[in-house]
Amino acid sequence: MKDLARFSGGRVKSRPEPRTQAALKHKAEPKVAVEQEVKPPSAPLQVQLLTIGEEDAGQRIDNFLLRICKGVPKSHIYRVLRSGEVRVNKGRIDQTYRLLEGDVIRVPPIRIAEKQEQVVPGAEFKILLEDNHMLVIDKPAGVAVHGGSGVSYGVIEQLRAARPDAKFLELVHRLDRDTSGILLLAKKRSALTNLHEQMRDGDTDKRYLVLVHGDWQNERQHVKLALHKYTAADGERRVRVQADGQASHTIFNLIRRYGDYALLEAELKTGRTHQIRVHLSSSGFAIAGDDKYGDFALNRALQKADGQRIALKRMFLHAYQITFVHPETGKPVTLKAPLPPECEKFLKSLPQENKSDVASAPSRTTGD
């Protein structure tokens, strides 16, 4: 009952009427005026009737409510679903019901905890492709893709703030905060579902450019190490190689050596969290600037220039190419994002080895 009193707009029968509450308090504390105890509600809460459009069709009712009722605990959302207070087309449904275009949803009065809304500054990013179904950007390093884990907001919140009239805008996949490069967003739910299916079925081809420290020998190297996600003592999300983890596969192609460094192309055959970073670290090759799985002494040294070599103040990992089937036209699309200037300048400051000794620059768009 306590939760209902806090989050629901309707009265709870077991709760005393305001006048009774005031009288009881006045009797126990004679110096407190009755008028101070009885306060009118700030605003009446009402039932909402929402009609589902094309963009929300196909979504589960529980996920829909969690999205539109921001600040309301999940437990309360599922409570009102179980109680039948939420109706679709005047009928009861369970939490697994998938919405159809034209459905009319009855959303009961739900009071959320009042909190000061944070103003998210709108921002636009370099656009690689945009149409009625998709938005593809070149994300800079140091920018999170979404808020959470100590980050107030990210790319998705900033884009929504910059595009207040956008009816639908969702991340198709994620990039680490310190990784730059190609990021896909969907402007229609149908596009989001289609692209998720392509990624789940392995029909997309994602490639990264990564600089590692060490004597890399093979021109083409398969790494198949199972990965397990866990939470470290400091609350950070981490990944380690573990026999009973998720099957993971990356192919690394040598592009060019730069003294003690090697520039690689990484082909993702699976898309696990931190996959490239952990596969390389576990193979004995630290990514330059990787502050989670890299060589920390090396990273400190890279923060400062040394002779001809300039400083590197970011992780050298860049999502430079992706191939997928357009969710509307059905035609293959290949997009590329060149290395950011700071990475290009860093490479030019390293010892330059003979290009003929290594593989040519990446140009293929399909995996094995």
Image: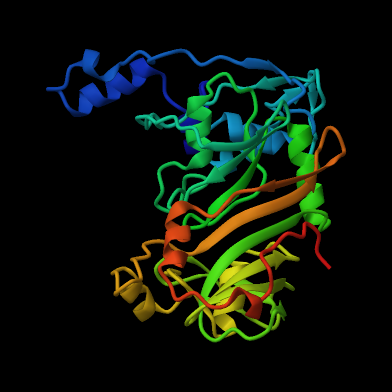
Rendering coords of residue 268 (x, y %): 71, 64
Rendering coords of residue 134 (x, y %): 70, 34
Farthest-out residue, right:
330
User: Residue 21 appears in which quarter of the rendering?
Assistant: top left
Rendering coords of residue 24 (x, y %): 29, 24
Residue displayed at 43% across by 52% down: 142
Q: Viewer-proximal residue, 205 or 26?
A: 205
Q: Tell me the quadrant of the picture where the C terminus can be found.
A: bottom right
Rendering coords of residue 109 (x, y %): 56, 21
User: Residue 127 appears in which quarter of the rendering?
Assistant: top right
Farthest-out residue, left:
31
Position of residue 1 relative to residue 179, above or below, is: above
Q: How is the image coloured?
A: rainbow
Residue displayed at 70% across by 71% down: 250
Q: Viewer-proximal residue, 118 or 168?
A: 168
Total numbered badges shown on the rendered structure: 0
Query: Could one spot residue 233 in this view of the protein?
Result: yes
Looking at the image, residue 74 sits to the left or right of residue 147; the answer is right
Position of residue 193 relative to residue 309, above or below, is: above
Query: Could one spot residue 236 in this view of the protein?
Result: no
User: Residue 101 appears in which quarter of the rendering?
Assistant: top right
Q: Viewer-proximal residue, 46 or 251?
A: 251
Looking at the image, residue 151 sits to the left or right of residue 187; the answer is left
Residue displayed at 67% across by 44% down: 172
